[in-house]
Every structure is written in C-alpha cells, then in structure tokens.
Amino acid sequence: MKKTTLEKSKKKKSLERKNKILIGLLVLLFLVFAIFVTASFASNNNSIVSDSEPYPFVDSSNSVSEKERINLEITRKNMEYRNNWQNYINVNTNEYSYHEIGGVENLQVVATNNTSYLITQMTVNVCYVIDNGDCYLNKEVVIYNIPANSTKSEFAPSSARGKKIRLDIIDIYSDKMNFHYQIATSVNSSADPYFTKM
C-alpha cells in the first residue's frame, strides 16, 4: 500500500512538472506569436503609409511635371529679362560737380539692376557733352558684379570740358541669366537674341 501511494505521489509530481512545462511552453509560444503579429501589423502599417505617399528618392509623374512647370516659368522669366533688358537694367549719374566755363568732377556712373540675377559686368560709355551738343571726350567705365535688385556705382574720370553727361550702355554680361548684350553686335532674329552660354 505504501508503494502505491508513493508511486501515485511520484506520478502526480511528475504529471504536475509536465503540466508546468507545457504551460510554460504554451505561454512562450503565445508571447512569440503576439510579438510576430505586432511586428507584422507595424510593418503593414508602415508599408501602407509609404504606399500612400511618393518615395522621396523616386520621381513620380506629378513631381516631374511640377519640375517642368517650374523650369518653364524660370525660362520665361529669364527670356523676359533678356528681351526687355532696358526695362530692368539702366544707368544714371550721381549729382556731379561742373564748372560754368566747363569741366566735370566727382562723376559716378550708377548702374541699376532690377533683375533677379547678378550682372557680372557692364560697360558704359561716358560722353562729356559741350555747349554745341558734341562729345568733347568719351570714356568707358566698367562696373563689375552688380547684385540682383540693387545698384552699384563706379567713378568716371574728370574732364576739363563739358557741362552735361550722356551715358550709353555698350556691353552687359550676366552669367547667371545667360545674357549678353553688345551694342556693336547685330541682333539675330531668334526669339531670344541675347541668350548666351559662356
């Protein structure tokens, strides 16, 4: 009788140990399954979000057409600047000093750039006008790096004669605008005659 009670007790303990191991395995399997489902759900959510928006490194047809539209607008704006440059680029003088009998001093040539681009170089002919309207003296003044939407001035030589000043722009070059105007060059008949790539 003792044997059977002892055997029953051992079997019962063995069965309880097996049950604990099985329960532990089931809990472990459940945790692994729960982690897998959570990870899978998170991955699906990420892919859903990224599928609804274009990838930053892949061009969609919308962004390509937007780039083309922007490029076209820039091209039109630049062409407007080049073809109608007189509306955006001009020169004047400062309040220089002159003598009644003739002579000009403290003369500055003031270039105005009302475009969105740096003007790399502008050459201006300065005519010192005498009483009969002729040019007593012609001098070229070069102004470099005129910032966008601003003015820049450069001193011109003094003259022993002349009471008035006449300014003529003879050359303008803007690398950023692909623009080159030269007074001595005949204008071609293209839609964008001052376009240049230098």
Image: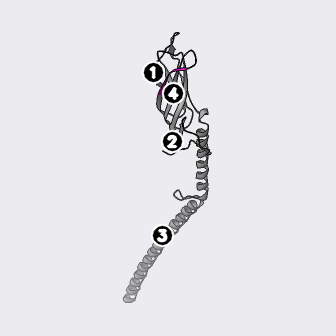
| Amino acid on which the number 3 mark rests in the picture | Leu
Secondary element type, mark 4: strand
Distance between the Cα atoms at labels 2 and 4?
A: 24 Å
Q: Earlier in the sequence, mark 2 or mark 4?
A: 4
Toward the viewer: 95 or 70? Answer: 95
Side (left or right) of 12 relative to 179: left
Q: Which residues are magenta?
A: 133-140
First reached walking from the N terminus: tag 3 or tag 4: 3
Separation of marks 3 and 4 at Cα, in angstroms: 87 Å
Q: Secondary structure at mark 3?
A: helix
Q: Image point 61% across, 37% down: which residue?
A: 84
The amino acid sitting under disc 4 is: Asn
Vertical placement of 20 versus 96: above or below? below
Q: Residue under circle 3?
A: 31
Which mark's residue is nearer the viewer, 3 or 2?
2
Identify the residue position indicated by label 1 in the image: 157
Q: Which label lies toward us, 1 or 3?
A: 1
Q: Which mark is residue 125?
A: 4
Q: Is 147 included in the stretch rendered in magenta?
A: no
Dot 1 and dot 2 residues touching (CB under 8 Å) = no
Quarter of the image containing the N terminus?
bottom left
Q: Is residue 135 magenta?
A: yes
